[in-house]
Image (spheres, helix red, strand yellow):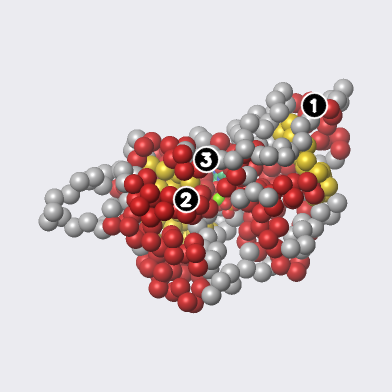
Amino acid sequence: MLPDASKRERLPAEPPRVQVARQLEGFVPPPRFGTTLLDTYAPTHESQRAAVAHVSSFVDAASHVPTRRWPWQRSGQGAGLYLDGGFGVGKTHLLAAAWHASPLPASKKRYMSFQELVYLLGVLGREGAQTAFEDVRLVCLDEFELDDPGNTLLIAMFLRQAFERDMRVITTSNTDPASQGRGRFAAADFQREIQGIASRFDVVAIDGADYRAGFRDASWSTEWEMREAETRVAGRVIHAPFAELVSTLEKLHPIHYRGLLEGVDLFLLEGVTTIPDQNTALRFVHFVDKMYDLGVPLRASGEVPLAEVFDAFYREGAYAKKHHRCTSRIREMLGEDVGVRGVR
Ligand SMILES: Nc1ncnc2c1ncn2[C@@H]1O[C@H](COP(=O)(O)OP(=O)(O)OP(=O)(O)O)[C@@H](O)[C@H]1O
Ligand SMILES: [Mg+2]
């Protein structure tokens, strides 16, 4: 029998704010990648085999950096590994696996998204960030993306100081380091910072097919599928008409989107339609990314084909990769079982 829709919750009018700066020890791989291992990465391309070897030896080296040096020993040897590739080739898988593989204690390694780091640097300020990362030896940073001069300068400064302290950084991106920022802001004016960042990273290009291709044909859920999913989850079900979600996201800084999703066992999104402007689209992308990382099961219905959620007018512009990645993730989520939360 189909469930009574009355047990559904609506989005909260006042979503809980996430106290990011107070949760430094909470920067670990998110539920979707909570148990991801190098051993479970099955390379399907030569470059993927090479990437596993790179990641593995980088993690090894990062775990054996001396924490104290004698005055005559050179410092500033920190280094970065930059996993660059298209969506679904397993970059985040390798990043999370690196965190798990590192024998460093949890207090000396952090896993966070690039967005979270930028937000954190803004909240903590220069000195606060220095203190917060003082003992950290390894940072795993997902989705490196320079969006504007502000985040470029913040990150450039953070990395400079971090590398001086011998910190190691592994990061993932859909864009090679030298092309960061292109088309999004006057990146040419920030070449010094961008080159400075790029020069500290070894770039490992990962090719191969989108691992999510198996979900290529996944599409919107029917009313029946949405109801049926509800019968299979015992916990919290949030039901949001698309327009309501859009207006909620508009009122919140993206760092707080997590507060809308934590503890949710099924998210029912109804009536997704074409998003007419880029800013609203980027907020939606960010929300979907959070939902994906947290492994919150999704069922969603749409008024337009999934490929048309992002309007053609901006879809192929400076953020094209973000839009395509988002569609690829939505398909994967819609094609996934809703039974067990956060576990594949
Ligand atoms: N070679 C692989 N072996 C096993 N699982 C893989 C492999 N590649 C990808 N996966 C799985 O496929 C899914 C998508 O991979 P992942 O999120 O790591 O890709 P990505 O390169 O980070 O993509 P995006 O650009 O969307 O961030 C994950 O569940 C991941 O564990
Ligand atoms: Mg990824």
Question: Measured along the vertical axis of the image, is residue 161 above or below residue 195?
Answer: above
Q: Secondary structure at mark 2?
A: helix
- Residue drawn 84% across and 54% down? 304
> Which quarter shows the N terminus?
top right
Q: Secondary structure at mark 1?
A: helix
| Label 3 environment density (alpha carbons within 10 Å; few <14, some 14–19, many ≥20) | few
Q: Earlier in the sequence, mark 2 or mark 3?
A: 3
- Residue drawn 63% across and 58% down? 322
- The residue at label 3 has a CB less than 8 Å from ligand 2: no
The numbered mark at residue 232 is none
- The residue that disc 2 covers is 123
- The residue that disc 1 covers is 7
Question: Measured along the vertical axis of the image, is residue 59 above or below residue 337?
Answer: below
The numbered mark at residue 19 is 3
Is any part of residue 273 visible from this angle? yes
Q: Position of residue 307 (x, y in %)?
A: 76, 57
Residue type at tag 2: Val
State which mark lies toward you, 1 or 2. Answer: 2
Res 74 → quadrant: bottom left
Q: Position of residue 192 (x, y in %)?
A: 40, 73
For the residue pair 74 and 48, the one nearer the viewer reads as: 74
